[in-house]
Amino acid sequence: MTPPAGPGTLASSSVRTVSTRDDADLKFDFSTRIRQPDFMILEGIVTTRDSHGTVNVAAMGPIVGEGMRSLLLRPYQSTTTYQNLKAHPEGVFHIVDDVELLVRSALNLFDAPPAMVPTSEISGSVLADSCRWYEFRVTELDDSRERTEIQAEIVHTGSLRDFLGFNRAKHAVIEYAILASRLFMLDEADVARHYGEFRTILEKTGSPQEFRAFELVTDYVIKQWPHFRQTVTSLNS
Ligand SMILES: Cc1cc2nc3c(=O)[nH]c(=O)nc-3n(C[C@H](O)[C@H](O)[C@H](O)COP(=O)(O)O)c2cc1C
């Protein structure tokens, strides 16, 4: 995907990357991160490039430390994100509030490449419909396990617009998309049960964007499990 030319940054700033306690802990205390009050997994979208400059867009949930000075990405070896970061160790992590964009990024459902603008410090692409972005460089890559651990430092950050705010339907869609991206390891009846819970939240709180995103996920699930709707109906009757 070739990003369109032209400036896209309304507000951006270079950040000095400093070695902090959270950077050190991200490297060494991965398994106990949930006990660290200043760590969390932040769900967003990562753009990377392959050795020919082709852009890949993927939903990812890196572990972030206090102050967002570094990221610990954990892409599976099967993902293009991992392969790209190994070939070209730079990328952009985006905070988004558009769950349709997130779903398309997770399930590779783009009809056309999303709008992008150039990066400032690295060779990469920024999603034009993101709220904030974080340009990063890989500092360490451990691919001794199927789920790799890629430590990266943030070298530039910028913002395009305010984050809309919380919405329960958006969270339901995100949970549903995560399940859909792991169908190979899940049970159809379990996913159908979750579908019912997510659908209730969607109907109570969702806007058209969340409904569209929800349908995209369901269509994707049905491609893998053609009887999914019947499974949902049988569980709820
Ligand atoms: C919110 C969210 C977070 C995700 N986080 C990760 C992650 O940390 N690591 C991973 O390998 N896949 C993650 N996924 C699944 C990937 O987005 C999915 O496998 C995608 O197809 C990978 O794209 P790629 O092969 O183009 O890199 C996540 C999905 C969602 C919806």
Image (cartoon, grey):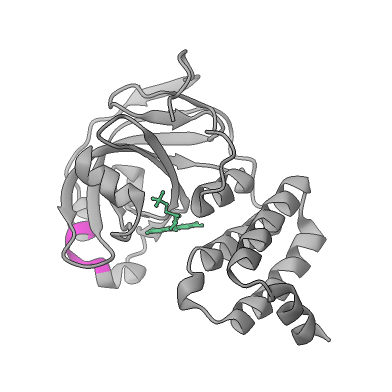
Where residue 42 appears, as percent x and y from the top left, is 44, 54
Does the magenta run of residues contain 28?
Answer: yes
Q: Is residue 25 above or below residue 152?
A: below
Q: Nearer the viewer, residue 97 or 144?
A: 144
Q: Quadrant of residue 32?
A: bottom left
> Which x, y percent locates residue 134?
37, 36
Q: Main secondary structure of the magenta part?
A: helix
Quarter that holds the C terminus: bottom right
The residue under the point 31% across, 58% down is 74
Residue drawn where x is 27% and y is 72% of the image: 31
Residue drawn at the location 28% of the way across and 65% of the way down: 147
- The answer to whether 229 appears left or right of 127 in the picture is right
Total numbered labels placed on residues in the image: 0
Quadrant hosting ligand 1: bottom left
Return the x and y of residue 58 as percentages of the image width and height: 44, 47
Q: Is residue 24 left or right of residue 75?
A: left
Q: Residue at x 47, y 73 (%)?
A: 184
> Is the residue 8 above or below the residue 47 in the image?
above
x and y percentages locating residue 234 in the rendered image = 77, 85
Q: Is residue 117 above or below residue 40?
A: above
Q: Which quadrant would the N terminus be assigned to in this image?
A: top left
Quadrant in the picture for residue 97: top right
Q: Is residue 41 magenta?
A: no
Q: Determine which quarter of the picture holds residue 17.
A: top left
Q: Which residues are magenta?
A: 26-30
Q: Of all residues shown, which one is farthest toward the right?
A: 237
